[in-house]
Image (cartoon, coloured by chain):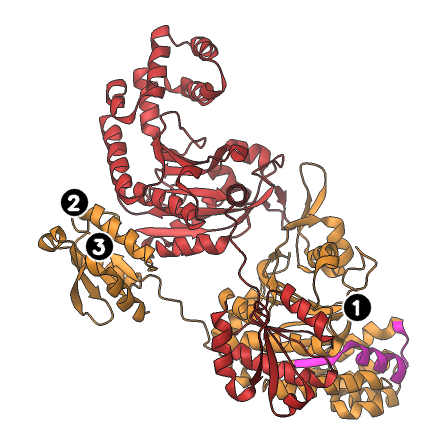
Chain colours: A orange, B red
Amino acid sequence: MYQNLKEVLSSFGYEEYAGPFLEPFELLASKSSEEIVNEQLYHFEDKGGRRVAIRPEMTPTLARMVAARLPELSRPIRWFSIPTCMRYERPQRGRLREFDQLNVDVFGGNELEEDVEILLVAVSLLEKFQAKRDSFTVHVNDRRLLDAFILKSLEVPEEGSKGICRLIDKREKISQAEFRAQGASLGLSEEKISLLERYLSSELKDQHELVDAPEVVDGLIARFETLRKVTDANIVFSPALARGFDYYTGMVFEVFDNHPDNNRAMFGGGRYDNLVSAFRKDKMSGLGFGMGDVALQNFVESHGLVPELKKEIDVWISFQEQGEYLDACLLAQKLRSLGLSVETNLRPQKLGKSLEVGSKKGASAAIFFNSEGRAKGEFEVKFLATGVQETGSQSALEELVSKIKETR
Amino acid sequence: MYQNLKEVLSSFGYEEYAGPFLEPFELLASKSSEEIVNEQLYHFEDKGGRRVAIRPEMTPTLARMVAARLPELSRPIRWFSIPTCMRYERPQRGRLREFDQLNVDVFGGNELEEDVEILLVAVSLLEKFQAKRDSFTVHVNDRRLLDAFILKSLEVPEEGSKGICRLIDKREKISQAEFRAQGASLGLSEEKISLLERYLSSELKDQHELVDAPEVVDGLIARFETLRKVTDANIVFSPALARGFDYYTGMVFEVFDNHPDNNRAMFGGGRYDNLVSAFRKDKMSGLGFGMGDVALQNFVESHGLVPELKKEIDVWISFQEQGEYLDACLLAQKLRSLGLSVETNLRPQKLGKSLEVGSKKGASAAIFFNSEGRAKGEFEVKFLATGVQETGSQSALEELVSKIKETR
């Protein structure tokens, strides 16, 4: 799993970083969301009387590390990490208390180019697992569009904005009548409720008529135009998308798993204004996303995309008598030095039984000895997929190695 | 660093496992040493009222996991992990509170073969970093030899054994007179103290005369005979070696870093009788070792063996005008699909400045556009190591990719 992720990220030039598992409580309290800090944080006092917490996410650590190294890093900065994190939540499908979360972030470029790249990366990660086009959908919005609509078009003051966001979030789950009733109880007029319905059902190009945020709409149009030329993934405009965290300030996105068993946001992210504000005066805006291991695992399992495990070993060397052990051990070392992975049994074992073990361990070939051959530096090689058996020799190891590598 | 370790372990057929970072306090209390549990454990009550602890080592987790899967695992079982662990200690050279520790364990074979293999693995790990023969020494003993000597030859009852072990441990650091005085205060006669001195200075073959443990001595002799034929690493008999943990029951070893700055045991391990005793009736003896990241880091740094970082990326694509961005993005995607790692700048940038960034990022080649070429699907390729520049074309990407791969 992680190998696939790392290969994609490395193909985009992202550099892996690592941070500490325990952080000062204050760092997390100042940078994480209230819900996480108040309800989900594992925190305690260490033996030195310091209040520490197990990281519930990587962003505060990332912010601190980027801030510390900012002057020396060449732009754009592309970083990723796959930290283990913990949150005290009720374990449920898609979420465990201890989880690994891929974090991908980019800083130091223009908004358009960064936004396009991070979506391309997100899509490429899933495509690396051979995900089909209709297996996931990327929903994209811009927080500035939603905010401007609420503030300017609905004329709801800032303190009412959260209530409207919660209503928008519920729209799919309740009836239209209920939606309109709840809108009214938030103080929206009939007319404004209709406007809200239009906003939620309008295409991107029509938003110019509904929201006074021409640059934001044009920016999103430009992103979609570029994306359509570089990927055929299913990327759609979703005016309802807000993303929970307060710190998003521009484009936001969520990738939905379209499998009926997992019908939910698999992962998402967005743009933030100044990641390092707590640590430096320099501004550093950028964007990123976090992808949990369990959501990805559910996705690949449900869609039948679990990567085949690589064959474990090339050669299983089996000895039947104690006297053959040294030869087995020496031959194993030679084959390892020629680039093969080799296991031996570690006690004399009957041949038939031992060949079974070799097969179970996924070896391409099994090697064993017979007494006449052994004196001449010879041994038997059995290719386990075909059953073909031949005599090998110490003097022709390299040819044997090439042959075995071909069966990988 | 870890890539090197993983490659060696995979060449020996060891399989990677992972376990949880938090474990129930009771599991660690029952399986870890007293010193760790009483003084070094990070433990606290979680929100559900359970006492949990951050793992200070991997062995208790390993024991639980092996026990759970024992019936289905084919022998020999070869497992490794590189968990992050925490111990509350005073940070010092070679030790930090949060550390990664490679754990390697083998079970299910004969003692001799297992012991030889685990020493071979330990040695191969360091050799993978090109460690020279005289840069480290492997000290080997058998707990049963030391125990038999103390019990039968010195005639010290079991409860006095720890005191003798502590005295033995100090011998190099105190004068002979002091050593003899402390021996006397532990109740040893003049004669027994002389016997102890002979034990500590005798070669392995002479131990038959000093200790009544013929099978143990012959077993060690057999291990050394085999090892001498399969490795030229510096592996020596060390009758003083005990290793702290109570659970070792057979061969024990420590690998010493011979660099004057690090003159200490870098890592070590040994044989244990029944790893899974807390979880299953089946016996499962085996052996293993743990190697901390910092000790390894100090070793490779002191000996000038820090692995050269792999070149970060193959290609740096640079665009100078906004209009070139889409072409840059498309070309990057094509080159990635052909197996290259490619970064682009994310805002228009002057060529000279951008080529500097590409160099700093370790790219083999930089690609940029000029306006006439771009219309024909052409671009400029500059090989950054040689400064050679040529014109590339969309229609000849595969040849370009081969050329760039050759410069890796």
Q: Residues within 10 Å of mark 3 (few under 14, many from 20)?
A: many
Task: Name the disc covering residue B108, or none.
Answer: none
Type of amino acid at the residue the image marks with label 1: Asp
Q: CA distance from mark 2 to mark 1?
A: 70 Å
> Is residue B381 on the magenta stretch?
no
Over which residues does the magenta segment extend?
Answer: A139-158
Q: CA distance from mark 1 to mark 3?
A: 61 Å
Residue that label 2 marks = A323
Residue at x-position 64% and y-position 50%: A20
Please state which of residues A358 and A49 is positioned toward the viewer in this rendering: A358
> How far across and how far down the image is residue A334, in percent?
28, 53
Residue that label 1 marks = A273
Type of amino acid at the residue the image marks with label 2: Gly
Q: Residues within 10 Å of mark 2 (few under 14, many from 20)?
A: few
> How far across and how far down the image is residue B202, in percent?
31, 21
Residue at x-position 61% and y-position 84%: B379
- Residue B291 left/right relative to B72: right
Please state which of residues A134 and B27 is positioned toward the viewer in this rendering: A134
Q: CA distance from mark 3 to mark 2?
A: 12 Å
Type of amino acid at the residue the image marks with label 3: Ser
Quarter of the rendering containing residue A120: bottom right
Residue at x-position 81% and y-position 78%: A144
Task: Name the disc covering residue A318, or none.
Answer: 3
Task: Output the chain of dot 2.
Answer: A
Please state which of residues A339 and A279 is positioned toward the viewer in this rendering: A339
Q: Earlier in the sequence, mark 3 or mark 2?
A: 3
